[in-house]
Image (cartoon, grey):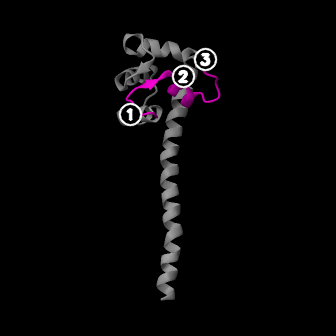
């Protein structure tokens, strides 16, 4: 009885560690994608204040929201070098309200969290 209960008792921390590792690994991918996008934006000579211009260039009818298609076009033109799946994953990361679009505020908060929004 002690051996079985000891084994079960030790399995619980292993499950917790495994779950924590999985969520950290997913977060790692999100952070790496965002850092790559941020660095490419900065390499292009753009700053946080220039992102509104990016939204006007790539959004439909001069709106301040990007659809997935607009987002893909923007990243391809920036030559960030992400595959289709990673672009979609990055898009989902930015679309934290789940409405199917990325607005300028969502984009700014993720890429440049320390910058004040006007």
Q: For the C terminus, give its image quadrant.
A: top right
Labels 2 and 1: the sequence-earlier one: 2
What residue lies at 58% left-to-right and 22% top-to-bottom?
Answer: 42
Q: Position of residue 68 (x, y in %)?
A: 36, 26
Query: Which residue does the numbered mark 1 point to in the structure image?
Result: 88
Would residue 51 appear left or right of 97 to someone viewing this image? Answer: right
Is residue 105 visible in the rendered structure shown here?
A: yes
Does dot 2 land on a helix, a strand or a loop? helix
Labels 1 and 3: the sequence-earlier one: 1
Query: Which residue does the numbered mark 3 point to in the structure image?
Result: 118
What residue lies at 49% left-to-right and 35% top-to-bottom?
Answer: 33
Q: Position of residue 101 (x, y in %)?
A: 40, 26
**Label 1 packing within 10 angstroms: few (<14), some (14-19), many (20+):** some
Discs 1/3, front: 3
What residue lies at 56% left-to-right and 29% top-to-bottom?
Answer: 109
What residue lies at 52% left-to-right and 74% top-to-bottom?
Answer: 10
Q: Quadrant of residue 91?
A: top left
């Amino acid at each position: 009885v002690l051996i079985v209960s000891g084994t079960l008792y030790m399995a619980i921390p292993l499950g917790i560690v495994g779950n924590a590792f999985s969520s950290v690994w997913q977060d790692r991918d999100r952070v790496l994608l965002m850092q790559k996008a941020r660095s490419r934006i900065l390499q292009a000579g753009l700053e946080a204040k220039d992102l509104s211009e990016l939204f006007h260039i790539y959004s439909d009818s001069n709106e301040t929201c990007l659809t997935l298609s607009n987002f893909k076009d923007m990243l391809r033109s920036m030559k960030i070098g992400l595959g289709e799946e990673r672009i979609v994953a990055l898009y989902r990361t930015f679309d934290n309200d789940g409405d199917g679009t990325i607005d300028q505020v969502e984009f700014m908060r993720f890429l440049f969290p320390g910058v004040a929004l006007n």
